[in-house]
Image (cartoon, rainbow, N blue to C red):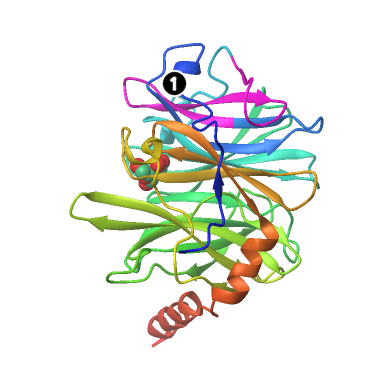
Amino acid sequence: MYEELLHRHPRNPILTAADWPYPANTVFNAGATLLPDGTTLLLCRVEDRRGHSHLCAARSKNGVDEWQIDPQPTLMPDPENYPEEVWGIEDPRITYISELGKYVIAYVSYSRGGPGVSLAVTEDFQHFERLGVVMPPEDKDAALLPRRIDGHWALIHRPVTALGAHMWISYSPDLRYWGRHRLILEARRGAWWDANKIGLSPPPIETAAGWLVLYHGVRQTASGALYRLGLALFDLDRPERCLRRGDTWIFGPEMPYERYGDVGNVVFPCGYTIGPDGDTLNLYYGGADTCVALATASIRSLLDWLDRHGKLDVSGVDKWHEVELASEG
Ligand code: BMA
């Protein structure tokens, strides 16, 4: 028996389109945060029957039920001013930035050129300041780290390059201009569960041991893609350095609401909250691109598992050096 690190909530799925106060096809891939009064806020991706997505906030005292859902979309695409949002906005990841006293949302803007990464800033989830597209297509699966590293903001994201679909980090002095791009974690190859395509899932979790990263691996099979989750740990002060990476996935589609839906066999977390004990991780994930579900884990046991099963991973660093050497040569 494999160890079970993530425990599904018995009330899953906790939110579906049937709960919505206005017509919606599906509700999934929600960003999450705790508001100052302890309320859980989920910023859900809502897809309409055109196939376009927008974001809508749902609030709950216990993070499980009695959700108060905004009666109208909370953040709609604004293609007139932001043409990169023409086909919708998707998969928000929320980071609270104490230096700014604001939340920064990294979301996918679906442009004619493919998906890119956009940022928006808010204090109250009612008014939003857009910073526009910060990573051009094709790029997605992005989240901001909650504090500056050596004076610079850091964004983890997943560009698709000639090297494949791997995880990168970039730095910025002002959240608008980004550089010092580094590959930090590579998809594996061949039969691996995380072969060819990986991406950051929720924002990294800051722990004393390092940035704990849940990432998704996409395996292509004869009957479509399988989305599963793995663990990696990155250096607190140099988040481009991967300290440990697990070989096996720790969570994958099993339940009917994960197996069946608009896109079956997908578990896709975009957010979490941490319980008052400082250890309980409440992970909110999309099930089969159709609903929102909840699983809990102990952060200590995730780190302990990585200690026992993780290995040093230098794939990203090595590849980057190869690229540097090749471009210099
Ligand atoms: C990814 C993202 C997610 C989605 C997943 C499965 O590429 O677009 O929004 O949940 O595919 O369809």
For the image, the number of numbered tags is: 1
First to last magenta residue range: 43-70
Q: Amino acid at mark 1?
A: Ala
The local crowd at label 1, few if under 14, some if 14 to 19, many if 20 or more residues have their Cα within 10 Å, is some
Residue assigned mark 1: 17
Residue at x-position 39% and y-position 47% = 253
Which residue is drawn at the image coordinates 81% and 33% (left, top)? 36
Whole-percent x and y of residue 151? 75, 62
Horizontal arrangement in the rendering, residue 280 relative to residue 219 (left or right): right
In the depicted structure, whether residue 27 falls above or below residue 227: above
Residue 50 place in picture, x, y as percent? 31, 21
Query: Which image quadrant for residue 283?
Result: top right
Image height of 211 relative to 324, above or below: above
State the SS at label 1.
helix
Q: Position of residue 34 (x, y in %)?
A: 72, 36
At horizontal 31% and vertical 58% (from top left) the residue drawn is: 219
Residue 38 in sight from this viewpoint: yes
Work out whether residue 322 or residue 282 is closer to the camera in this orientation and state it: 282
Q: 41 above or below 240?
A: above
**Which residue is located at x 57 percent, y 61 percent?**
170
Judged left or right of residue 287, residue 232 is right
Is residue 110 part of the magenta span, yes or no? no
| In the depicted structure, whether residue 317 falls above or below residue 205 | below
Residue 70: quadrant of the picture: top right
**Depth check: 327 or 108 in front?**
108
Asked whether residue 68 is drawn in magenta, I would say yes
